[in-house]
Structures are given as structure tokens and as C-alpha cells.
Amino acid sequence: MIDFESTFKISLRSLYVNKMRSILTSLGIIIGVSAVIIMLSIGEGAKQRINKEISSMGSNLLMVLSGSTTSSGVRMGSGTQPTLTIKDAEAMLIRCPSVLEVAPTVSQVQQLVYSNQNWSTSVSGITQGFMPIRMWEIESGRAISQDDIKNTTKVAVLGSTVTTNLFGDMDPINKTVRIGGMPFKVIGVLKSKGQNGMGQDQDDTVLIPITTAQKKLFGTDFPGMVKHISVQAKDEESLSSAETEIKELLRERHNLGKTKDDDFTIRNFTQMLETAKQASNTMAILLGSIASVSLLVGGIGIMNIMLVSVTERTKEIGIRMAIGATAMDIRIQFLVEALLLSLAGGLIGVVIGILGAKIVEMFSDMTVVISATPVLISFGFAGLVGILFGYYPAYKASLLNPIEALRYE
Amino acid sequence: MALIEIKNLIKTYATGDTYFNALNDVSLSVDNGEFVAIMGASGSGKSTFMNVLGCLDKPTSGSYFLDGIDVSKMTMDDLSAIRNRKLGFVFQGFNLISRTSALENVEMPMIYKGIPPEERTKRAKAALKIVGLEKRETHMPNQMSGGQQQRVAIARAIVNDAPIILADEPTGNLDTKTSIEVMEFFVKLNSEAKKTIILVTHEPDIAEYAKRVVTFRDGNIISDEYNKNPKGIRSSERVAEGEVSLNDDTDKAGG
């Protein structure tokens, strides 16, 4: 067997001699590799966006919603029957070991008015636990304090969308807005979180003390009732135990016998997002697989051209054999040619793939994340395709009979 | 032992149910330094004999000792190495690899011998100088005349220091003048470099250059004669006069 350097040079030479053909053959691999990289980068982008969403929503989050009312046999849906109370939330914090923090919340859509501007949005009455659980941060001013809750002060923290709509470029701090006709002092503005996974604007919100909401703003027949309770579990592993603990506690507190249905609903948002993450993963794998098929087709292109090349160069193979090339030398030469084609295609594909991903990012609102893994995988796959599809033509070349090959015209 | 020792060589081809003996019990021995012409009409078995002699084909039965080695039972891979080290081929159609420079064509046998690149280039340049083509190193086969191409092929045949040169109708594609030049080159290789030359031809005046003429007919050797007066470099006077030069780089004839 001959040294690799010489084989490499011989192969490179033959490819160079047939420049156009070599480029066209590589094209299949170029398209395949760049498609794989673009698809996987889009998939990775989707995954990271969901991850960001999980962290913006709050990690290890459970949502406890009050039950549904039934009026004349018509069930009204979650949250219509006020069954949860602040006391329920406090009890969770004490009696459920897997629960780290709770945030009972009441909310209603209210009309906000400032000067000649008005805006309708969801107003939430919150406790102190709410902001840390839901990953809200203050942009300017201050958050709602324990004193505000104790004293039922009429203060409000505005989301950035609300601020823009009511105040434009003005600083809203210490201004007075009317919420449902009632004057509230703006004490803070929330840091923007953008859209959530469903495309809702999370910044279109107003926070006020829960006590103020219950006692002054929202007229309610059931004092102390809350619409939902956000619960933060200690960690990801304790999410399901927290769910069980809360369920047992609430059934006990609400005096539900063994036969009665729950009068509340527990939603595991983290789990939902995990599911979404898995879905996007599946999507990424699916897109990647489709792109891989084009890589495979590129490989068939290589095999096709290599077979043509072997036939066309039968005489050359005969000459090489006559002057001392072994079957193995010939086989390796053609295999290296196929490998060079696929690796060169792979390399160009990587460049085009990365550029393509950047272009997608530039011209669409998709998040595109280019990481090393898909680049390495697709490049490696290109090499593998080269070996797999290059082997048969190379094997065929090595089987040629030197006498017949020499006679070939 | 002779350089080439062939005994009772039989080569049988099967076509359907019938068997055909292309070579029928051929024995031949060639000593080191001989210049043998193998003659015969087409179908006489001389090409088959040449293929076996060139280790490109294996005999059906019989023995073939080349330089003391029994090659008749060797595998194709081992035969590749024998071809590479013991034999140099010169073909009728030159058989240079196209779109590959003269130098690279000459280097090729050394690649398969595993000679390092610098050494290869050095020796290939030396071989091209011997055939008088040192100025044509970078030329592609299609940029050279037939005579020049055949001289590149000769350089390729001698570059690995093979003791035997097998020439299969080397002048078949060349005009008379170029044929003479090429043949005189073989004479020179035989007399000066002491190469054993085996030449297949059907042209009697080409065979006249050989010291020994073996004639085939119907798969048998029908005559094996020594030529008392082979054509030497009969034009040595003419070379001196400048009519014919072996190192003629201005050769445009042939093809």
C-alpha cells in the first residue's frame, strides 16, 4: 500500500482535472450540510426561546385556580367559582413542605385613565411573593411593599406597555392614574418581559396591593377570595409532590368528601413548558432528519459520479495496475476522492449553512442559535456519507482486470 | 537459472461449453541481457503470452520463474509488486495518464514502490533526461508528439530499475522515422544499460533489431532463432552527422 500523502495528491489532482464535475457533485453535500445546519439552528433557537420563557414566567411554578360554577347544569369553567382564599395560600406555605413561596392573586380587567389618555388592561391584586415567583423586576420606582398591603394603599406598579400607552415618554412615577374611576399613585414601572409563548404581551398589566383590590377596587361578594394562587415549588423534582400536597390540603380545607370532585384546578406551567420544549425538540429532530435526507441524496450523487468516473477512467486504472498499483491502492484512491468531494462539500456547506442561518435570523423574527454541535454533526455526517457511497465505486474500480482495463478505449 | 524460465505453459479460455487453448504447452527461457522479439499473426497467442509474461494474467497450468521467483501461483496483489519492481511496460498506445504531466507520469511507478517524493522527482527527472525530454517535464501527453509520448513511456518503464522491459508493439502508432528512433533507443538500453528487452511485434523490420526472434502460431512456438546480425544503432554515423539524435527534443513527427 502506498503512503497517504501520495494518494491524497493523486485524488486531489483527479478532482482538480474535472473541476466542474467535482463542484456539481459536491453541490448535493453542500445543500445537505447547509440545510441541516440551518434547520438545527432554528430548532435550537426555538428551544432557547422556550427556555427563556420558562425563566421569564418563573421556574418550578404551579398555578392553583379556583373551581367552576355550575348554574342550571351549565358549567362555567375554571375561576368562575371563588373557592380559594388567602388563608388557603397561607396554609400551603405552612403545611406543604415542597412549597417555597405562594402568591394569591385577584385580577380583573379595568379601565385606566390618565389625563386625556385611557387604556383597558388586566389589573392584578398581589402579595409580596408575586414578583419574585413570576420573575418580575422593577425598572424604576419601587415594588409594592408589605405596608402597602397592610394599609390597603392605593398604589400601582405599571407594566411597560401600559406606561407607554398612558404616559408616552413621560415619567409616570408619582403621577396619579384612575383605575376604574379610583385614583392610584404610580409607584413603579416593571421591567419589560416581552411576549409569552402564546404571543400575549406580558407587559400589558398593572399590579396593585391585593388588599386594596379586594376591599376597594373590585366589588366582591366573597371577601378574602382569590382568583388563583401561584405556587413556587422548592425545585423541579418537588413539583409533583407539591401538587399532591396542595391537592390534599385543599380537599381537607374545603371539606370535600371522598366522592366530591375538586373545586379547584392545579396547573403545572413548568411541565407545560417542558412539554413545549420537547415538542420543539421533536420539531428540530424532524427538520434535521428531513435535511439529512438531502445529505443522503447528495451521497447518492457522489456514488453516481464516482461510478461514471470509474468507467471513464478504466484505462487509467489499467495503467496504474500495470505499473504496480494493487487493488487496495486503487480502492483507496477512489475512496479518498469520494471522501474529498464530500468533505470539501461539507466545509462549503458549513459556511453556507452559517450564513444562511444568519440570513434567516435577519429577515424573520425567529430566534436562530448556531452552536458547534450541529456543525460538527453535519460535517461528520458528510464524511460518513462520502465513505459509505464512495466505497462501492472504489470497490468496483479495484476489481477491474488490468488486461481488460488497458484495452478499454 | 535464466532470468525468465517458462515451462509447459498452458492458458485456456472458456467460451460457453468449449475450451480454447490460447497457449498450448509453451516453454521458453530468456537470459539476462537478451533482446527478444516475439512475432506472430494476431490470434497466434503472442498477446496472451505477453500478458502472462507481464504478470498481468495467470497461466492455467505450467510454471513461470521470473528472476528465480515462481510467479505462476502468486496472488494478483503480489503480482502487482512484481510488475512494479521487475518489469517495465511500453505499450503501443503509449498509455500515459492523460492530463498528467510527463514528470508525474514517470513518477507513478515509484509512488507504488513507496519511494519518498523528493527522491521520486529526482529520479523521474533523471529518467526523462535519459530519453532526452528534460525540457518537457511539465508537458501533458496531448501536448507531445507520439514519439515524445513513447519516450515518456520508456522513461516510466526504466525509472524503477526493472531488469526487464516488455514492449508491446511500441512502434505500432509511430511513423517510420520515429519508429527507428524508438527502436534504436531499445537497442541502446539493451547494450548500454544491460536491460533485458522483450518486444512483441508483427513487423519483420522491427524484429530485426532483436538478437533473438521467437515466432508464435496457434498457441505454440514454431521457431526460436538467433539473429547473428541484429540491426544495431546502424545510424551511429548519422547520429554523428546530426541526422538522427536520440536526445532530439525537436521531434514533432509521429502520433
Image: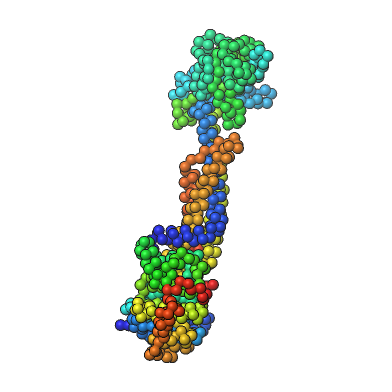
Question: Tell me, what colour scheme is on the image?
Answer: rainbow
- Whole-percent x and y of residue B193? 35, 77
User: Looking at the image, which residue sits at the far left?
Assistant: B1
Could one spot residue B38 in this view of the protein? yes
Q: Image quadrant for the N terminus of chain B?
A: bottom left
The one nearer the camera, A32 or B213, is B213
The residue under the point 45% across, 26% down is A234
The part of the image, by quadrant, that contains residue B211 is: bottom left
Q: Residue at x 56, y 9 (%)?
A: A153
Q: Answer above or below: position of A91 versus B43.
A: above
**Foreground of the two, A402 or A110:** A402
Residue B156: image quadrant is bottom left
- Residue B7 x, y percent position in the rendering: 37, 85
Q: Is residue B117 above or below residue A245?
A: below
Query: Which residue shows up at 51% across the image and 61% down it?
Result: A17
Q: Which residue is at the front of the view, A360 or B209?
A: B209
Q: Residue at x 51, y 46 (%)?
A: A350
Residue A356, how many percent across, how many down? Answer: 56, 43
Q: How far across and how far down the image is residue A7, in percent?
A: 42, 61
